[in-house]
Image (cartoon, rainbow, N blue to C red):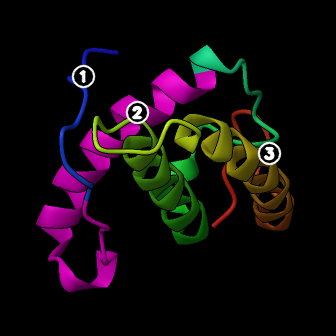
Amino acid sequence: MVNSQPSFPPEPIMWSAYTREEQRHLLEGLDVWVRWLVDHYRLDRRYVPECWTKHWELIEELSALQLAWEGAYATTSHDDAPLAWHERFAVARTRLAEWVARTGCRAGDHRP
């Protein structure tokens, strides 16, 4: 993942405030981070299915997780912020698994 370390607190995304085109652009950026997350932490499709971009509950959860990650690794963060992020990540994985289970999606099988 090519990314520079933020030197300022990140800003949350309120997805409903953007047009569909703007949302698509924002999703492209989030997708880069989610691909890194899945690879880096070896997450399987129980947590992030291939069709995650088609489920707003997953978009919101992953977007919030990215925001917290950026904040934890900003040069202005406290020294224990990365540890706190990992604690939040553990809780978020439980929620992600619950959201994915509710979607009914399986590998190669998206359900709207």
Q: How far apart in space, not on screen, are marks 3 and 2 (Cα)?
A: 17 Å
Helix, strand or loop at mark 3: helix
Give neighbour class at mark 2: few <14, some 14-19, many 20+ (Cα, 10 Å).
some
Residue at x 39% of width, y 49% of height = 71
Q: How far apart in space, not on screen, are marks 1 and 3 (Cα)?
A: 23 Å
Q: How far apart in space, not on screen, are marks 1 and 2 (Cα)?
A: 9 Å
Residue at x 17% of width, y 77% of height = 18
Return the disc, 1 or 3, that comes first in the chain's sequence: 1
Residue identifier under label 2: 33
Mark 3 or mark 2, which is nearer to you? 3
- Tell me if residue 8 is in the magenta stretch: no
Locate residue 17, reporting x and y percent: 21, 84
The answer to which quarter of the image holds residue 100 is bottom right
Q: Which quadrant of the rendered structure holds the N terminus? A: top left
Residue 86 or residue 30, whichever sits in front: 86
Give neighbour class at mark 1: few <14, some 14-19, many 20+ (Cα, 10 Å).
few
